[in-house]
Image (cartoon, rainbow, N blue to C red):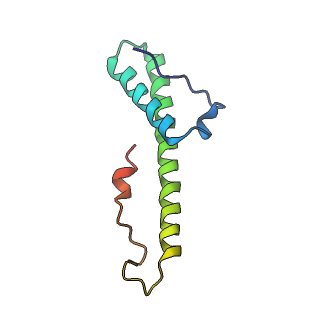
């Protein structure tokens, strides 16, 4: 099984897409579940996985804000679908990357 791509602190983590971060996170989880890694390497892989989780959460939160702003810009207080800032989407479930 291929190991997840190594992420360095100055790597492109801040620019990768949600889909790429999520894919790498899956690889990271598989590598940790497979076991057999020396403790130091397993710790580093875990740390990289946590950075990927943070990236996924950041992108999901940014998307949630953007969708909320779009909904509010297209609906006003007189709109029957306007719910005082409540979303139809369950963002807590979606944010669990």
Furthest-bottom residue in this view: 78
Front-most of 82 and 33? 82
Looking at the image, residue 96 sits to the left or right of residue 55; the answer is left
Question: How many labels, in total?
Answer: 0
Name the residue rendered at 42%, 25% in the picture: 27
Front-most of 39 and 85? 85
Name the residue rendered at 44%, 32% in the picture: 23
Name the residue rendered at 50%, 55% in the picture: 63
As displayed, is residue 44 above or below residue 22?
above
User: Percent x, y for residue 73?
Assistant: 53, 74
Looking at the image, residue 48 sits to the left or right of residue 87; the answer is right
Furthest-right residue in this view: 10
Indicate the quadrant containing the N terminus: top left, top right, bottom left or bottom right: top left
As displayed, is residue 14 above or below residue 38?
below
Name the residue rendered at 52%, 49% in the picture: 59
Front-most of 74 and 13? 74
As displayed, is residue 28 above or below residue 82?
above
Looking at the image, residue 65 sits to the left or right of residue 34; the answer is right
As displayed, is residue 75 above or below residue 34?
below
Looking at the image, residue 78 sits to the left or right of residue 33; the answer is right
User: Percent x, y for residue 21?
Assistant: 49, 36
Indicate the quadrant containing the C terminus: top left, top right, bottom left or bottom right: top left
User: Percent x, y for residue 86?
Assistant: 38, 71
């Amino acid at each position: 099984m291929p190991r997840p791509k190594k992420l360095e602190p100055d790597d492109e983590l801040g620019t990768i897409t949600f889909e790429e971060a999520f894919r790498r996170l899956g690889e990271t989880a598989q590598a940790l579940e497979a076991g057999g890694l020396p403790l130091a390497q397993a710790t580093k892989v875990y740390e990289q996985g946590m950075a990927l989780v943070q990236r996924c959460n950041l992108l999901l939160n940014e998307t949630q804000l953007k969708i909320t702003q779009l909904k509010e810009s297209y609906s006003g207080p007189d709109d029957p679908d306007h719910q005082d800032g409540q979303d139809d989407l369950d963002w807590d479930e979606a944010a669990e990357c």
